[in-house]
Image (tube, rainbow, N blue to C red):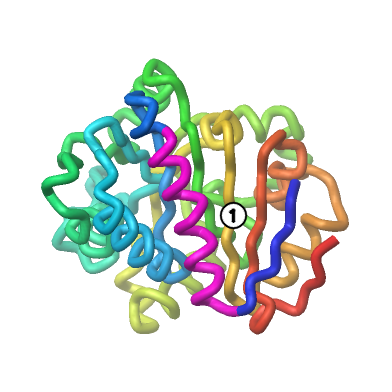
């Protein structure tokens, strides 16, 4: 694992966009399909703004780009929340990345994939059949979750068992609900769904390259635990320690952590 300290949010956003752009352009130049795992949230807003601008400016061919989002909220009916829902991740991606891409680059709506709470195992099957993820972008929850893979007690699941978890519907932890209410829902707890469908640990860890970005002071504790620990279900992001090509970029002005 590599650690990189960014000066501030803008620096982190440019760095994240650089890695994503490089992965997309490599595939475009080779004329091959690129499977890109994408995250949402406030951390990624600057990244997607920078990325779209660079792709448009450099006229990168996106006809072979396929995106796979980490998660989506689930409504009381067991279906994904509609795009009209203010917290919909489909809506987030459309507003913050997809609509900013020049249509002439060739990225089509059917190239954007999201896990389906009705049949989450199909998401894994189709991703595996497509060759798996070339690059996975991650954020980190204040409790150390990645995607919506919430921490579990080692008494409930083994280290290997947690790493093998597939995409599935899960109940959100209370800290996750409260945090998302504060950061994305104007402190309206009722607006945050209690369930989500998440990409599993198995397809995430199978990505050939992983980049995790962090910019909130509340992320210092899980980052410190990653650096000083080992993979454990109590800290899902700690599984990046054993990944052959993983990188964490954090903002030095908000997270008081030194690089190893």
Instruction: Say which quarter of the image contains residue 110.
Output: top left
Quick one: which residue is furthest to the top in this view? Answer: 129
Q: Is residue 33 above or below residue 217?
A: above
Report the predominant secondary structure element of the magenta stretch.
Answer: helix
Asked if residue 140 can be seen in this view, the reply is yes
Magenta stretch in the rendered image: 8-26
Residue 50 percent location from the top left of the image? 37, 65
Instruction: Say which quarter of the image contains residue 231.
Output: top right
Q: Is residue 205 above or below residue 19?
A: above
Q: Which residue is under mark 1?
A: 212
Which residue is drawn at the image coordinates 64% and 61% (left, top)? 249
Q: Is residue 252 above or below residue 115?
A: below
* Quarter of the C terminus within the rendering: bottom right
Q: Is residue 50 magenta?
A: no
* Depth order, front residue of 17/251: 17
Residue 179 percent location from the top left of the image? 50, 73
Decide if residue 232 is on the left or right side of residue 178: right
Which residue is drawn at the image coordinates 39% and 41% (left, top)? 24
Decide if residue 259 is on the left or right side of residue 211: right
Which residue is drawn at the image coordinates 20% and 41% (left, top)? 107
Asked if residue 117 can be seen in this view, the reply is no
Q: Is residue 20 magenta?
A: yes
Local SS, label 1:
strand
């Amino acid at each position: 694992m590599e650690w990189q300290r960014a000066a501030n949010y803008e620096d982190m956003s440019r760095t994240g966009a650089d890695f994503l752009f490089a992965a997309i352009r490599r595939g475009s130049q080779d004329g091959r399909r690129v499977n890109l795992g994408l995250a949402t949230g406030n951390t990624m807003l600057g990244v997607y703004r920078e990325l779209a601008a660079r792709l448009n400016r450099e006229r990168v061919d996106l006809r072979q780009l396929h995106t796979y989002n980490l998660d989506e909220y689930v409504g009381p009916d067991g279906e994904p929340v509609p795009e009209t829902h203010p917290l919909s991740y489909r809506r987030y991606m459309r507003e913050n990345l997809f609509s900013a891409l020049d249509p002439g680059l060739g990225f089509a709506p059917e190239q954007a994939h999201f896990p389906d709470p009705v049949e989450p195992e199909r998401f894994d099957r189709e991703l595996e059949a497509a060759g798996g993820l070339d690059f996975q972008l991650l954020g980190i929850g204040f409790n150390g979750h990645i995607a919506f893979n919430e921490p579990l007690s080692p008494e409930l699941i083994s280290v290997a068992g947690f790493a093998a978890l597939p995409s599935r519907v899960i109940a959100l932890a209370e800290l996750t609900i409260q945090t998302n209410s504060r950061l994305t829902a104007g402190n309206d707890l009722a607006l945050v769904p209690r369930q989500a469908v998440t990409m599993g640990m198995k397809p995430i860890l199978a990505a050939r390259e992983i980049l995790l970005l962090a910019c909130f002071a509340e992320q210092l504790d899980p980052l410190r635990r990653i650096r000083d620990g080992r993979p454990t279900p109590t800290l899902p992001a700690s599984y990046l320690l054993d990944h052959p090509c993983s990188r964490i970029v954090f903002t030095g002005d908000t997270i008081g952590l030194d690089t190893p």
